[in-house]
């Protein structure tokens, strides 16, 4: 069975703090894909990043960075110098190689206080 | 980018009513999905479609049906709405294989009274 766990339900930080959102996944597939989505208060999910199971390179995009570790089945997301506009619900998701179905975690609500 | 639109942002219906939620994508994507989002449960897949007139059940299909008569349109139908179907409903479209990201619509917040 496939599963995604986001143990942090809510996180509150003050602007300019760094924050890491955790994502742990379970799958028996050798080929799989991991995603992060952002859901701002407007409601629409916005794609942030994808990773395939053969690419463990970490990625940095501006203030955002992602740490993919197969050894611990984790795909964590770090926001550096957080801003109020980062306030949103963040979802981690998993897709097995043989399906187009996405399995979502329960999401982490990030509140960045000014 | 793909544009996915949903017919309503907010909808209020009464128990027992038949409810149609419409989703339209502006690209020629084969795959379309309906999810519901509830606090603490994340997004759960209701139905998906990989081509016109083709559909597959997701994880929570009970109480729902779908229709895909044209490639760009995927409808979610609540045959007889119940209060436990009060939720946020999200539609998504996907082109190509599993490596690609799904594009989501803005969501429809449905309240069943």
Image: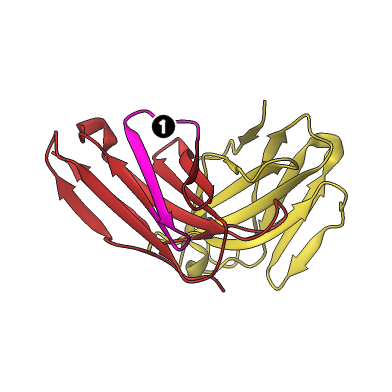
- Image quarter of the N terminus of chain A: top right
- Magenta residue span: B57-74
Which residue was labeled with disc 1? B61
In the rendered image, residue A8, in percent from the top left (x then y), is placed at 56, 40
Residue B102 location, quadrant = bottom right
Q: Which chain is red?
A: B
In the rendered image, residue A79, in percent from the top left (x then y), is placed at 65, 61
- Image quarter of the C terminus of chain A: bottom left
Q: Is residue A114 left or right of residue A68?
A: left
Q: Is residue B15 left or right of residue B67?
A: left
- The local secondary structure at tag 1 comes to loop
What colour denotes chain A? yellow
* Residue B106 visible in image: no
Tally the numbered discs: 1
- Whether B53 is drawn above or below A64: the answer is above
The chain holding disc 1 is B
Residue A32 location, quadrant = top right
- Whether A44 is drawn above or below B18: the answer is below
């Amino acid at each position: 069975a496939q599963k995604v766990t986001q143990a942090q339900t809510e996180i509150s930080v003050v602007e300019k703090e760094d924050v890491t959102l955790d994502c742990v996944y379970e799958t028996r597939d050798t080929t799989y894909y991991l995603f992060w989505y952002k859901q701002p208060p407007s409601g629409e999910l916005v794609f942030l990043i994808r990773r395939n199971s053969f690419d463990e390179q970490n990625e940095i995009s501006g203030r955002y960075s992602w740490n993919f570790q197969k050894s611990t089945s984790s795909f964590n997301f770090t926001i550096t110098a957080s801003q109020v506009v980062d306030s949103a619900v963040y979802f981690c998701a998993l897709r097995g190689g043989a399906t187009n179905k996405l399995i979502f975690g329960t999401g982490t609500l990030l509140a960045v206080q000014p | 980018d793909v544009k996915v639109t949903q017919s309503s942002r907010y909808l209020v219906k009464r128990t027992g009513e038949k409810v149609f939620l419409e989703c339209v994508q502006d690209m020629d994507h084969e795959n379309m999905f309906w999810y519901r989002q509830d606090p603490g449960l994340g997004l759960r897949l209701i139905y998906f479609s990989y081509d016109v007139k083709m559909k597959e059940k997701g994880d929570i299909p009970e109480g729902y049906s779908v229709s895909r008569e044209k490639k760009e349109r995927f409808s979610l139908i609540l045959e007889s709405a119940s209060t436990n179907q009060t939720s946020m409903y999200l539609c998504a479209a996907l082109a190509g294989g599993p490596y690609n990201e799904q594009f989501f619509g803005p969501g429809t917040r449905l309240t069943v009274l």
